[in-house]
Image: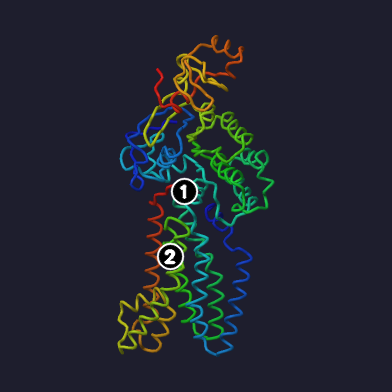
Amino acid sequence: MIVEVGSVTKILGNKEAIKDVSFKSEVDRLIILGHNGSGKTTLLSMLIGVLKPDKGKISIDGINPCKERDKILKKVSFSFEKPKFDINVKVKDYYNFMKEIADSDCVEMFWSQLGLSEAKDSMLSDLSSGQGQAIQLMQAICRNSEIKVLDEPFSHLDYVRAGIIGEYIVRKGLKIIMTTHVPEEADWLAEHVVILKDGKLVWSGKFEELNQGDYFEVMVRDSSNLPNVVAKVGNILIVKSSIEELTRLMSEGKIMGFKRVGVRRYYESYKVVS
Amino acid sequence: MRAIRWYLKGLFPPTFTISFYVIVVVLEYLLYYGSGRISSVMYTLVFFINPIFVISGFLHVSRSREITLFELSMLASWRDVALAKVLSAFIYIIPFAVIQSTFILAEHGSSQYALTEVMFLLSYTSLGLLVSLIGSKSSGLAVAVTAFFIMPISVQILIINYIQYKMKVDQFISSVGYILNPITTYCYHVQGIVTLGLMKGLIINIVADAIFLLLFYIAFRSIQIKP
């Protein structure tokens, strides 16, 4: 999957939602990470051709989504975060419809493992936000398409259901373009990460590049006596250290745990820690 | 086509459909046999029943931005979703048009009045599809309610003004009349006030509907949707 975004700008109202963003990704799992209002959904909308950029070019596997709108719809299926249904359809009717047009194993996973069967007689409009999101994701993930474009797919799901879907994506080797504001989701699924802030590109690159250098995420209860801290968000610190040093600190009870730094290296602090 | 099958789901909500049809049939029966005049039925249709019916169809095809995106992804075609909206809207009006036309034919014996009823439904269904392109469902509904109730009355008022000034209604206004209120316009044609005949009115109505539908199709396929 080759995604190319070249100097893209998008103005919504009076605000530049996306400001001169460029990147190129040639992996199967592209994650767009950013805080609320960072422009993730706007960028995603342009990638599938439902919004047109005011400046710049976008292509997915050589297709210009804004000019070849039907062609891109054959290639990608997508879901957006807000799971609000105002249509007069029952869950079981939707399920039967999906069985005819989508991968049956995938549909069954949503039906049984994600619990949609329990709401089979409900109208789509009466579902909880979590069930609504599962309905959205069912068509996006199960419909026969090469690329799944998912906007905050786990935002309304509990961690068990989010885990089932994430695991399915990895196990099946699905090609995805996904937005999230949760670093752990990006750390789990990303092969290429694009980090946005206020519509601007903060960082773009392969996930492995984030792991280079002796940077770690350290979980603490009290951060007062820890050396070489380069960024801090809540109880997670980004520190330059070594595995030996951190193991010692953990055995002394000074830190709760640690892992190699992931997307937080750029996402949380927005400092380049070289 | 899968998009059409999807759009047929929920098209005739049983509770609304049954109660609406029962009320309409009883109302028309009482009106006709109470007054002995088909015009009572026709005016009730124009100003009350038809707008409510067309708005209920509008509610089916007018979908929120989130649902439009959901359907575009699921059905994988801008063209198919647009066509499914058009076809489901017309499938929705067919039973109603048949029942109304049959009633008018049976009680009045005039196929012309039955035809004007069908023209009315066609016009406002086409206009409803255009209105459904308005960004949000609530604002689209507000426009539809206002337009579908006010436009037929406006035509009536316009023609009454012509009558007050003892003028014949010219071709242009007659054409607008046959698009926005064919029933009343034809009634005034029978009285010799509107010069344009029913057949010409029918052609104008069909051409206008085709233009509305074409505009809807083109606009839908190029619309930008902000989730």
Closer mark to the observer between disc 1 and disc 2: 2
Callout 1, which amino acid?
A: Ser
Quadrant housing the C terminus of chain A? top left
Q: Nearer the viewer, residue B154 or A181?
A: A181
Q: Position of residue A100 (x, y in %)?
A: 60, 47
> What is the distance, in whole Å, between disc 1 and disc 2 at their CAs?
27 Å
Q: Is residue A103 left or right of residue A42?
A: right
Q: Residue at 56% of width from left, 41% of height from top?
A: A137
Is residue B217 placed above or below A11 in the rendered structure?
Answer: below
Which three-letter amino acid code belongs to the residue tagged 2?
Val
Where is residue B23? Give x, y as percent: 60, 76
Which image quarter holds the N terminus of chain A? Answer: top left
Q: Quadrant of residue A62?
A: top left
Q: Residue at x 40, y 27 (%)?
A: A203
Q: Position of residue A40 (x, y in %)?
A: 43, 38
Q: Secondary structure at mark 1?
A: loop
Q: Position of residue A221 (x, y in %)?
A: 57, 23
Chain at tag 2: B
Q: In the displayed image of the protein, which residue is found farthest to the front?
A: A224
Local packing at callout 1 (Cα closer than 10 Å; few below 14, some 14-19, many 20+) is many
Q: Nearer the viewer, residue B20 or B142?
A: B142
Which badge, 1 or 2, comes first in the chain's sequence?
1
Q: Height in image: B120 above or below B91? A: below
Q: Nearer the viewer, residue B17 or A15?
A: A15
Q: Which mark is residue B143?
A: 2
Q: Residues within 10 Å of mark 2 (few under 14, many from 20)?
A: some
Image quadrant assignment for residue B198: bottom left
Image mark 1: chain: B
Q: Which residue is mark 1?
A: B77
